[in-house]
Amino acid sequence: MTTLRICTYNIHKGFSQFNRRLAIHDLRDRLRLLGADVVFLQEVQGLHLRHAQRHADWPGQPQHEFLARDVWQQTAYGGNAIYDHGHHGNAILSRHTILSQANQDVSDHRFESRGLLHCEVRVAGIERPVHCVCVHLGLTAGSRRRQMAAIVARLDELAPDGAPLIIAGDFNDWRNHADDHLTGPLGLNEVFTTLRGRPARSFPSTLPVLRLDRIYVRGFAVDKAEVHYGPPWSRISDHAALTAHLRSA
């Protein structure tokens, strides 16, 4: 039986809450302690020329490569918000081989650039590739509804017949409407709902109140799920990190 450890984390572009300090180095150290096999990251800074000039310890690599170095051999990045001095988006870090990757633009309007980063990951012991989708959905209910419809349409086409599937990220879904759009159509289960009856509180990371982040799975049993908040996590990002220990079903 194959086990898989998953983490999802909105890293706030490598800065602490309210952008008080550069936290990317602390983030790398803490992330490695979680021992995740596949990491789903949101608000990843692929390039920022101004930060590189202002901060002497700004990494010389894109943030996903800096975080993955020497631990996660495979990475994928989808730049969603692109501007004159850089870009940011979602990333997936993996100890397992990434067979394919694609980033689908699901921006609902010009004020929010959003994408679905989809990878197929080959995991030893699991017959079919595991479809991994990293998301950061919009701030309005209408945007999220249309973006989740795009998720369903894409996965219906690319991961049919119950193929193993993990969708994780920042859903901005404090009213918990995502279950209505994803669990039935795609046969998914949210890991915290499976174990505790409702999604985890994940924002703000000091003392979480809002249930914004999710890990949805298909083809896996859930052994354990944790929220990583409070010090030192609250000094790294405004979101808590979520982890789940899975078993292939």
Image: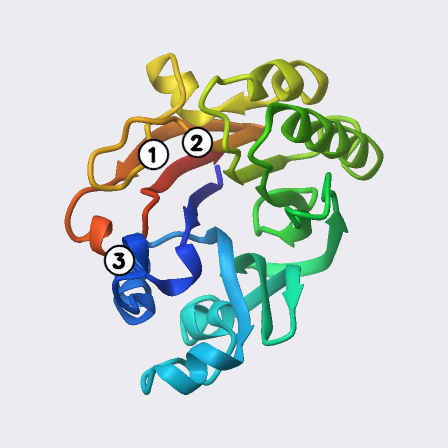
Q: Which mark is residue 212?
A: 2
**Amino acid type for the residue under numbered disc 2:** Leu
Q: Earlier in the sequence, mark 2 or mark 3?
A: 3
On the image, numbered disc 3 is attached to which residue? 33
Question: What percent of the width, then of the height, locates residue 15?
Answer: 34, 62
**CB-based contact (under 8 Å), mark 2 and mark 3:** no
The secondary structure type at the circle numbered 2 is loop
* Distance from the alpha carbon under mark 1 to that under mark 3: 19 Å
**Residue drawn where x is 44% and y is 23% of the image:** 174
The secondary structure type at the circle numbered 3 is helix
* Distance from the alpha carbon under mark 2 to that under mark 3: 23 Å
Q: Which mark is residue 110?
A: none
Q: Nearer the viewer, residue 202 or 249?
A: 202
**Amino acid type for the residue under numbered disc 3:** Leu
Q: Earlier in the sequence, mark 1 or mark 3?
A: 3
Q: Nearer the viewer, mark 2 or mark 3?
A: 2
**Residue drawn where x is 73% and y is 39% of the image:** 108
Question: What percent of the width, then of the height, locates residue 39?
Answer: 47, 52
Q: Nearer the viewer, residue 137 or 6?
A: 137
On the image, numbered disc 1 is attached to which residue? 202
Above/below status of 208 relative to 129? above
**CB-based contact (under 8 Å), mark 2 and mark 1:** yes
Q: Residue lying farthest left?
A: 231
**Residue drawn where x is 43% and y is 49% of the image:** 10
**Amino acid type for the residue under numbered disc 1:** Ser
- Neighbour tally class for label 2: few under 14, some 14-19, many 20 plus, Cα within 10 Å: many
Above/below status of 152 relative to 113? above
Q: Residue lying farthest right?
A: 157
Q: Quadrant of the C terminus?
A: top right
